[in-house]
């Protein structure tokens, strides 16, 4: 398999640029991650769900050539981001018993593949809801306080980077595929419903000491292999509707972050635009060759033609 890192570098550039807006010249002592498969380093390995990637070819380029539960061939963008920031080589999964608080003190991910803002999305494949990820974080803070002492733990919470990547599954797995939420909400109403959850989550993180947060927007979900596969089998979701909803949600998300930046004293919130760079790659596949990340394992034009 030919591995081309164009997409990964593109995503990393976005993340690094976003983080630089937060940190300035200040060194970040740790990275705390919430979200879905884009940032899950193996938490789903330790819960009863079908949403796992603990088998080859996943992980074939990770240390030792073994799958870790990451939904890619090697490391995740947040792993590379952590290394680029001089924190650590990779960010471990909180539920992985191979790691302890001494490892988590400088980096940890609570992410769970197939989850979303909406708990109904998490229920589809019985994965960890965002609200439960937050409860794990509270548990982690208690462990960190015992490990570092109260003052150092408070300082670590304030100075660490918090990265959140979530939301795609709410539309692919849930709203545009299953009847429940689409019967309760229009697309616009559902977007606002998710944004209400995002607001509450970010506000609670702030109350727990977080001050430097980067939040990724949604990709053009209609082009993702999972969306095209589900559409090929069931005729749903409508791929253009998915892309439109993603664009609309991203605009609203940026407005939310701007609003919270004014409301919450001392917070630094930045938006990481994933949609437009990824769309450029999709529309110009010849410039990027082949890569494998989150299901793309061949040139994008052939992925499109195969559905």
Image (spheres, helix red, strand yellow):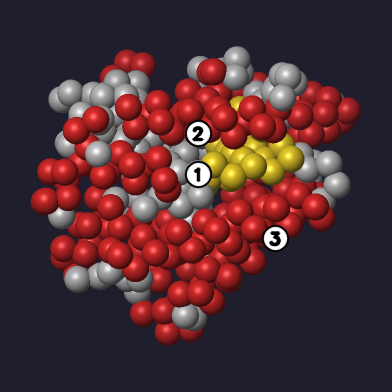
Crowding at dot 2, Cα within 10 Å, few <14 / some 14-19 / many 20+, comes out as some
For this view, does 298 lie left or right of residue 115?
left
Q: Is 139 drawn above or below residue 195 in the view shown?
A: above
| Residue in view at x 47 percent, y 39 percent | 39
> Marks 1 and 2, how far apart in space?
7 Å
- Quadrant housing the N terminus: top left
Which dot marks residue 273?
A: 1
Q: Secondary structure at mark 3?
A: helix
Where's residue 189, x and y in %? 54, 76
Q: Residue at x 35, y 55 (%)?
A: 221
Q: Outermost residue toward the right?
A: 151
According to the image, label 2 marks what residue? 14
Q: In screen coordinates, is 240 left or right of 258?
A: left
Q: Residue at x 30, y 58 (%)?
A: 222
Percent coordinates x, y for residue 171 in the rendering: 41, 64
Q: Looking at the image, which residue is at 56% across and 65% down?
A: 194
Q: Which residue is mark 3?
A: 200
Q: Is residue 197 above or below residue 293?
A: below
Could you tell which of marks 1 and 2 lies nearer the N-terminus? 2
Q: Secondary structure at mark 2?
A: helix
Q: Nearer the viewer, mark 1 or mark 3?
A: 1
Query: Could you say which is closer to the camera, residue 250 or residue 44?
Result: 250
In which image quadrant can residue 55 be found? top left
Q: How far apart are the alpha carbons under marks 1 and 3? A: 21 Å
The answer to whether the residue labelled 1 contacts the one labelled 2, judged by CB atoms less than 8 Å apart, is: yes
Q: Tell me if mark 1 has few (under 14), some (14-19) or many (20+) residues whose alpha carbon lies within 10 angstroms of its own.
A: some
Q: Residue 98 in the image: x percent, y percent?
A: 50, 26
Q: Position of residue 227 (x, y in %)?
A: 28, 58
Verify CB contact (< 8 Å) between mark 1 and mark 3.
no
């Amino acid at each position: 398999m030919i591995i081309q890192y164009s997409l990964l570098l593109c995503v990393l550039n976005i993340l690094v640029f976003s983080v630089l807006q937060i940190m300035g010249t200040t060194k970040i002592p740790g990275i705390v991650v919430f979200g879905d498969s884009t940032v899950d380093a193996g938490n789903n390995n330790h819960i009863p769900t079908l949403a796992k990637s603990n088998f080859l070819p996943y992980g074939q380029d990770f240390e030792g050539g073994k799958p870790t539960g990451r939904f890619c061939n090697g490391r995740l963008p947040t792993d590379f981001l952590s290394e680029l920031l001089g924190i650590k080589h990779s960010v471990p999964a909180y539920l992985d018993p191979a790691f302890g608080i001494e490892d988590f003190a400088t980096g940890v991910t609570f992410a769970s593949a197939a989850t979303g803002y909406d708990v109904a999305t998490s229920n589809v494949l019985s994965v960890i809801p965002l609200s439960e990820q937050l409860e794990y974080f509270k548990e982690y803070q208690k462990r960190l306080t015992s490990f570092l002492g109260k003052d150092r733990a408070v300082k670590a919470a304030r100075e660490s980077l918090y990265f959140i990547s979530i939301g795609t599954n709410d539309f692919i797995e849930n709203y545009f595929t299953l009847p429940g939420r689409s019967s309760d909400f229009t697309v616009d109403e559902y977007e606002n419903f998710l944004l209400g959850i995002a607001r509450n989550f970010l506000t609670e993180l702030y109350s727990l000491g977080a001050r430097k947060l980067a939040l990724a927007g949604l990709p053009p979900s209609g082009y993702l292999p999972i969306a095209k596969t589900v559409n090929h089998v069931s005729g749903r979701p409508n791929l253009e509707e998915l892309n439109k909803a993603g664009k609309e949600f991203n605009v609203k998300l940026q407005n939310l972050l701007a609003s919270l930046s004014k409301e919450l004293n001392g917070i630094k919130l930045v938006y990481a635009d994933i949609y437009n760079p990824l769309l450029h790659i999709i529309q110009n596949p010849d410039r990027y060759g082949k890569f494998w990340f989150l299901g793309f394992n061949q040139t994008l034009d052939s992925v499109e033609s195969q559905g």
